[in-house]
Amino acid sequence: MKVVAGLLFVCALAAVATLGVLDQHSLNYAQRTDFTFEYDGEQLGATLLTPEGKGPFPVLVFLHGDGPVDRFANGGYVAIMNQLLERGVACLSWDKQGVGESSGDWLAQSMRARANEAKAGIAALRGQAGVDVGAVGVIAFSQGGWVLSELTEGAEGASDVDFMVAVGVAVNWRRQSLYLQRQRMLGEGYSEEQIATALAFSEKSDRYLAQNNLTYDQYLAWLRNSAPPAGVLTEPMSPERYRFVMRNMQADMSAGLAQLRVPFLGLFGEKDRNVDVQESIQVIDGVFQSSNWRDYQLKLLPGATHSLLKAKYFDFQTPAQWTLSAEAMFLILGPDAFAEGFLDSLGDWVATKSIAVHKHSEMPSRKTSRISQKGPETPN
């Protein structure tokens, strides 16, 4: 009988522990509103989460990184959104085109098209209760940085954005691609000499592709005849991926950031294997210094990965490299999977800037909505 009682007690503890783990990955909102908005003939499936308390609430809009990302990044946004909701900040996110409940194809989009899509999403907030359309920020992850830089002051509709957060962003597409290749080759054991030879070939190849605008068949023919050195990936891109890269490979944040006139927070991981964070910090700081913009912070978080997770457990370059033990650790740790200081730094900064922006929006000259009444623009 005692053995049975002991087993029941152990099972009860396991159940409580399991519920605790699952609870860490649950969204803690007061109200969830699922809706769709239109951009360029496509329907985007979106979710607005509002916190406990009396609104209207400031809103942070999520701009995804590369790949087929859904509105919650397969659960990766949960801890971030909860941190914001606890501080009285609403969250808006939607499935990328062709993902989840959204029509279209994200691979057919340029960064500018995605920025225009974001403007349409922000404009859709006009029809939602409990939000302050005079206090809207964006948070961009990785590739989303090039979307963010299209939303700065010089772009039409940019005044709809009151503050910006960039997480693990690269400034220049082609330089980031070379850094990514270097880190991959280091991980695969190539020598510095082999890496230098491969990077020189890749840089020359990128320049050739950018200048000649090859069709996909021409690209395949060029790839067959190019004789790349060791370490250069020879598997051809799919037609969709190739066109996506050709459409966006000239992306660079510098020009957009030079026109930025809203508070900016940049968060970077010291152990980032995807982005040269030292270059990003140096270039972004230099751009703001040259444009005489001072309302910004750039933080490098020790021991943090590209996604600002703890490198101790999650030191991978791509999601495909994650081990079963890493996936289990992410579930067990919940918010503690993120690097020390990330969630608090983000939440505190957004909450502080939201309050300041909200007070400014209540001034008589700013009481009318600043969101454009025009429909979404067609991408160039």
Image (cartoon, helix red, strand yellow):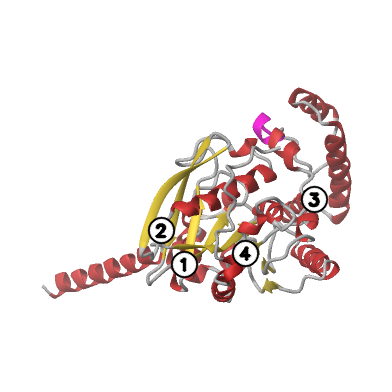
Q: Which residues are magenta?
A: 237-242
Helix, strand or loop under label 4 = loop
- On residue 57, the disc is 1
Q: Earlier in the sequence, mark 3 or mark 4?
A: 4
Give the quadrant of residue 313: bottom right
Q: Is residue 220 above or below residue 310?
A: above
313 vs 26, left or right, is: right
Helix, strand or loop under label 2 = loop
Question: Could you tell me what secondary structure mostly forms the magenta stretch?
Answer: helix
25 vs 365, left or right, is: left
Circles 2 and 1: CB atoms closer than 8 Å: no
Residue 41 in the image: state x and y as whole percent: 54, 34
Q: Is residue 368 above or below residue 96?
A: below
- On residue 129, the disc is 2
Q: Is residue 156 visible?
A: yes
Q: Residue furthest left?
A: 1
